[in-house]
Image (spheres, grey):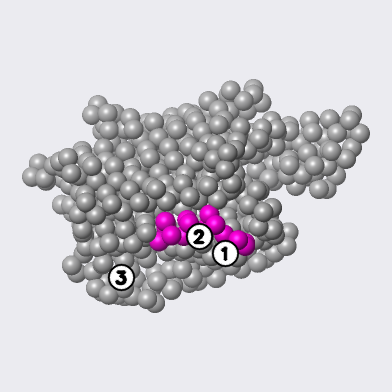
Amino acid sequence: MPHLTETAAEPRAGRREWAGLAVLALPTLLVAVDINALFLALPRLSVELGASAVQQLWIIDIYGFMVAGLVITMGGLGDRIGRRRLLLTGAAAFGVASLAAAYAVSPAMLIAARTVLGVAGATLMPSTLALITNMFRDARQRGTAIAAWATCQFAGAALGPVVGGLLLEHFWWGSVFLLAVPVIAVLLVGGVLLLPEFRDPDGGRMDLASVALSMLAILPVVWGVKELAASSASAGPGAPLAAIAVGVAFGAAFVRRQLTLDVPLLNLRLFTQRPLTLILTALVLAGIAMAGTGLLVTQYLQSVLGHTPAQSALWFAPMGLGVALGTTLTPALTRRVAPRTAIMGGLTLAAAGATLLTQAEAGLPVVITAITVLALGTGPLFALGTGIVVGSVPPEKAGSAASLAESGNFLGGTLGLALLGTAAAAVYHHALPAHVPGAARETVAAAAAAARGLAPARAAELLAASHAAFLSGIVAIGLAGAALFVLAALLTSLLPRANAA
C-alpha cells in the first residue's frame, strides 16, 4: 500500500495552501460554535415561538440526525462532483438556512431551517478534510494542517456556549444563528480565490439505493440510542430497541450492496487495512468516553452546584480547550517521538484524567482538572488518527475516508451519551436511599424540583442524598472512561510503526 507512506518526492505546500487552510478552518469553527450556542438559546426561543416539548427536541436533534444520515453520502458525492464545489454549495446553503433560522416565526419554520442546516453541515466536514488531504501531500505538513483543523473544531466547541451566552445577554435569540452569515461570506470568497478543485475521475454515478439504505440504517439507530439515553417514558424501551433492530437490518443490506457494487458509495474493503480499522475503533472508544464524561460534568455544574448555563459553559470550556491544546502541540510532539507513541501516550494521559474524575467528591477544582487532563490526552489521537484514516486511501478517495472519520466521531459521541448516560442514571437510582420518592429517583434535577416542595430539613436531606448519589455516578463513569481509554491505547499500540506517520 504505497499511499500509506509518503516519500520525499511529494510536493510541499506553499503560501497559497496555508492561506487555503485558514479558509477551511472557518466552517469547522463555525459549525462547532453554532451547535453549542443553540443550547443556551433554546429556552428563550421556545418561549417566544411557543415551541412544545416535542418541538424543542426536534429543534435540537434534527441537525444531528441529518448530519449522521448524510455524512457518508456527502463524502462520496464530493469525490464525484468535486470537493470545492460541494463545500461552497453546502456553505451557501448553510448561510441561507442560518438567516431563515434567525428570523423564524414558528417552531415549524425553525425545524425546517435546522433540517437544511443539517444537510448543509453534512457537506462541510468531509469536504474540508478531503481538501486538506489533497492540498498537503507532504506527510509532516499534512499532520500540522490536520492538527490545526482539529484545533479549530474543539476550540469552537469550547467557545460556542461562551459566545452564545454573550450574544444572548445583548441580543435576541436569533443572533446565535446570524453569527454564521459573515463567516460564510468570507468562506465563499476565500474558497473561490484560494481553494483548488479535486474530484475522482473514476468516481462513477452516485448509487441512490445505497444513499437510501445508509440513511435507513443510521437514522433509526441514532434515534433509538438517543431515546434509550433519555430513558423515554413515552416510548418505553421497546420502541428504541425496535428502531435499533430496524437500523441494523438496513445496515446489513447496505453492507451487502456495497460489497457487490463496482463503485460503491462506501468502500468497505478499506476496513481490511489494519491502521484504518484500529484508528476508527480508537476514535469511537474515545468519543464514548468523552461524551459520557462531558454529559455528567455539565449536569454536575448545573444540577449539583447550581451554576447558570452561561457559568457552566465557562467552567466546562477547559475540556474543549484541552483537546484544542493537545492537537496544537501534537506536531511538535511528533518531532521527538513516533506518532504511534504520541497517540498511546496521549490516551494513557486521558485515562489518568478519567481516573482523577473518580475523586469528584473533592470538589470542582478536581473535576475541572480531570476533564482538562482527559481532553488534553486525546489531542494526538484526533490530530494524527484523522490523518492516518484519510492517508490510508488514494487522494481521489479522500472524501469517502474523511466521512468515515467523521462517522466514527459521531458514532462515539452518540454511544457515549446513551451507554454511559444510562449507566450513570442506573448508578444514581441505586445509590439513593430507599425512602427517596419515585420522581426524585430519576434524575438529580428531578430531585431538586421535588425538594422545593418540602420542608427545609427534609429538602436538605433529599438534596444531600441526591448529590451524593450523582457523585457515585460520576465515579462510575470516570472508571468506565479510564477503561475505554486504556483499551484505545492498547489498540493503537498494534499500529504498524511504518504506517503510523
Name the element at disc 2.
Answer: helix
Q: Distance between the residues labelled 2 and 3?
A: 35 Å
Look at the numbered discs 2 and 1 and tell me whether their residues touch, using CB distance below 8 Å.
yes
Q: Whole-percent x and y of residue 490? A: 40, 39
Which marked residue is nearer to the observer: mark 1 or mark 3?
Answer: 1
Please name the amino acid that badge 2 sits on.
Answer: Ala
Residue on which the image places disc 1: 109
Does the rendering let one see residue 420? no
Q: Mark 3 points at which residue?
A: 264
* Circle 1 SS class: helix
Q: In which quarter of the image is the C terminus?
A: top left
Looking at the image, the residue that sits furthest to the bottom is 209
Q: Give the range drawn in magenta.
A: 93-107
Count residues near mark 3 (Cα–Cα under 10 Å), then give few for <14, some for 14-19, many for 20+.
Answer: some
Q: Which amino acid does label 1 sit on?
A: Met
Q: Where is the N terminus found, in terms of image quarters?
A: bottom left
Q: 367 and 25: which one is in front?
A: 25
Whichever of callouts 2 and 3 sits on the residue coming sooner in the sequence is 2
User: How many angstroms separate mark 2 from mark 1 (CA)?
Assistant: 8 Å
Q: Which residue is drawn at 89% across and 29% down?
A: 457
Q: Residue at x 29, y 42 (%)?
A: 22
